[in-house]
Every structure is written in C-alpha cells, then in structure tokens.
Amino acid sequence: LDIAVDPLDGTTAVAKGLSNAISVVAVAPRGCLLHAPDMYMNKIAVGPRAAGKINLDTPIEENLKILSQALNKDISDITVTMLDRPRHRELINRVRKAGARIKLFQDGDVAAAIATCFEDSGVDILVGIGGAPEGVIAAAALKCMGGEFQGRLYPTDEKEKARCTKMGLCDIEQVLTMEDLAKGHEIIFAATGISNGELLKGVVYYENNMAKTYSVVMRAETGTIRFIEAIHRLDKKPEYAK
C-alpha cells in the first residue's frame, strides 16, 4: 500500500486554539499516491460541477469565468479561498479586481480543498501555494468526491530542486493532475476533526475520561462518503491510559 498521512493538518490552528484542524490519511495500492517532497506546491481545487473545466495554467480571471458558467453563478457570488500569506498578495488583488469574494484561512489547506466539494461550505475554489504532501492527500480526497485538484511543485531553492530530481520528479514545471497525484479509484480517505471547522466538529471531551470525535471516510471506487460520530472511553485505550 501507499499511505499518505498528516496527523495534524493545521498545527498553528491547534496551537492558537483556532478552527479547522483535522487529522487525515489516504490509502491506495502501491504506486498510486505520489511521493511528494516536503516543499511547496502551487494548487487549484474545485468541486464536481467544475471538474475538467479549470486549469492551473489558466489565469485566475479566466478560471473564475469558467467557474461562473459551471456553477451558474455570477463571479460576484463565487468565493475563492487561499492561505493568508504575503506570497498571495498579488493573487488576492487579482481576485478582488475580478469581482469574486475571498475567504482567507490561516492554516490547513486539506480541509479547505475538501470544502470546495460541499456546496453548503460556501467555498467554490481553492488556489495558491501550500504544502506538497498535503496536496497529494487533498487530491485523494477530491478523487473520492468527484472534484478536481491540480498542482505544480514550487521549490524555493536549488536544494529543493535537487530533491525533486532525486525523487524522480525531473520536470518541476509539470502540472500534476489527479492521476499524477492519486492514481486510480482504489483510494480511501479518512479525516477526523481536531478543532471545530466547517467540515468536521472537533474533539469534545467529557467527564469520566470520555471523548467524542467526528470523522468522514470516503471511498473513490463507490463514491460513498460516510460521516461518523464516535464516543471513546479513553481509559480502555492503552495509548491514552498511560
């Protein structure tokens, strides 16, 4: 098997008591998940209604027009989400000039990518630069939901470029499609909320050493999405009883 895991997507969110931190894992047959180097990736993600229509190399203004037609929405009603980082300042200005709405988040872009597939999330498209390993996990999740994710590795120095070459990723300008990142349909994705978010509620602790978790499990082969609420008796779990 290939296993891609991020035990804490949203480290800063947890440290500061903020929202949208989740624990995520994707599993697929060996060779199906890209072994992405630990560096940045330029990303774009949309839900099922816009899958196959957007492109990472297309200017954001054109992607917004395409998205407007796919979703039957005015551009002014489209919400673009991205990490709140100085590197996105120009992109933010272009989105605002195009007339779309912006929703910035502080940390954890896996949850933000997944949100594009749920209409009641209020998010229509994810763009910008985030972590490459997180991009693989997000692609696996969107494969299960029928959305689309594209990415391009974004090395910031010669050492990172050399790392790409060593890992067999020689063309760093290549747009990585869903099949490059998460190949096939034998993919399973799971996430559990750590702090409250739009996708999942966070862990709730009760008296008598008990806790409640909210999780989602997805399967690409069938398209099934399961939401699971679980109550845990922590004193019966050896890893917590120490």
Image: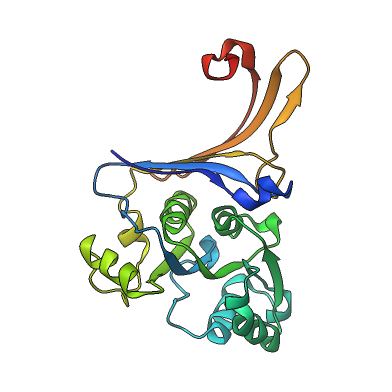
Q: Give whichever of 209, 72 is nearer the camera.
A: 209
Q: Give whichever of 121, 173 is nearer the camera.
A: 173
Name the residue at 71% across, 16% down: 209
Name the residue at 47% across, 50% down: 141
Image quarter of residue 93: bottom right
Residue 34 x, y percent position in the rendering: 31, 55
Name the residue at 46% across, 63% down: 148
Q: Give whichever of 66, 181 is nearer the camera.
A: 181
Residue projecting furthest to the bottom: 97
* For residue 103, above or below residue 3: below
Image quarter of residue 236: top right
In the picture, measured across the screen, residue 94 lies left or right of residue 17, that is left
Residue 48 x, y percent position in the rendering: 52, 61
* For residue 26, above or below residue 180: above
In the picture, measured across the screen, residue 40 lies left or right of residue 8, that is left
* For residue 196, above or below residue 113: above
Count of numbered badges drawn on the protein: 0
* Quadrant occupied by the N terminus: top left
Residue 103 x, y percent position in the rendering: 70, 68
* For residue 154, above or below residue 122: below
Residue 30 x, y percent position in the rendering: 24, 43
Q: Give whichever of 52, 4 is nearer the camera.
A: 4
Image quarter of residue 157: bottom left
In the picture, measured across the screen, residue 20 lies left or right of residue 47, that is right
* Quadrant occupied by the C terminus: top right
Name the residue at 51% across, 42% down: 24
